[in-house]
Image: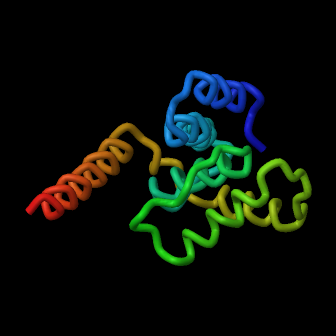
């Protein structure tokens, strides 16, 4: 469940007319903080980001999946958007998920890991845009 402060920040971004990705960034930031605090871990930096984006969609941020996303990711994003506003949750499933995430490492959200992820994502964007213009 996202914190009230995070939801409020995302709503403020929406009121200011900012993009859905900016609104979702608040949830990703919150997820990174949770991992750094030791609430749970993640297998990779990408997983930490994905958890934040999923939370954003479930909180009502109209965030479509990326154009390069796999079929499974697109379907999951659709399910997350459909769940927006609904409060029902499987207690057993959420407890099992948290238990599994607690076993994962916390180093995936270190400054070094995040900058490595940002660089690799930027490289992919650069090569894609270069191939489009050619």
Indicate the quadrant containing the N terminus: top left, top right, bottom left or bottom right: top right
Left-right relation of 77 to 88: left
Give the answer, above or below, for where 46 lies relative to 75.
Answer: above
Of residue 82 and residue 99, the one placed in the foreground of this image is 82
Question: x and y percent of residue 109 in the render?
Answer: 46, 44
Residue at far bottom of view: 71
Give the answer, above or below, for where 56 lies relative to 43.
Answer: above
Left-right relation of 70 to 120: right
Indicate the quadrant containing the C terminus: top left, top right, bottom left or bottom right: bottom left
Left-right relation of 133 to 110: left
The quarter of the picture where residue 51 lies is bottom right
Left-right relation of 123 to 5: left
Question: x and y percent of residue 130 in the render?
Answer: 13, 57
Question: x and y percent of residue 62 in the render?
Answer: 63, 48
Of residue 74 and residue 51, the one placed in the foreground of this image is 74
Residue at far left of view: 134
| Residue at 26% over, 47% down | 119
The quarter of the picture where residue 37 lies is top right
Total numbered circles: 0
| Residue at 75% over, 33% down | 3
Type of colouring: rainbow
Give the answer, above or below, for where 22 lies relative to 90.
Answer: above
Of residue 33 and residue 64, the one placed in the foreground of this image is 64
Question: x and y percent of residue 4 in the render?
Answer: 77, 29
Of residue 77 and residue 47, the one placed in the foreground of this image is 77
| Residue at 55% over, 41% down | 20
| Residue at 47% over, 74% down | 70
């Amino acid at each position: 469940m996202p914190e009230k402060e995070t939801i409020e920040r995302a709503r403020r971004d929406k009121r200011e007319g900012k993009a859905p990705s900016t609104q979702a960034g608040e949830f990703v930031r919150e997820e990174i903080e949770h991992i750094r605090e030791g609430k749970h871990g993640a297998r990779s930096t990408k997983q930490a980001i994905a958890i934040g984006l999923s939370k954003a969609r479930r909180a009502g941020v109209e965030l479509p999946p990326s154009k390069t996303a796999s079929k499974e990711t697109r379907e999951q994003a659709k399910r997350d958007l459909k769940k927006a506003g609904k409060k029902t949750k499987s207690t057993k499933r959420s407890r099992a998920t948290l238990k599994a995430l607690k076993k994962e490492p916390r180093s995936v959200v270190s400054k070094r890991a995040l900058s490595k992820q940002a660089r690799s994502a930027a490289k992919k964007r650069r090569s894609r845009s270069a191939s489009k213009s050619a």
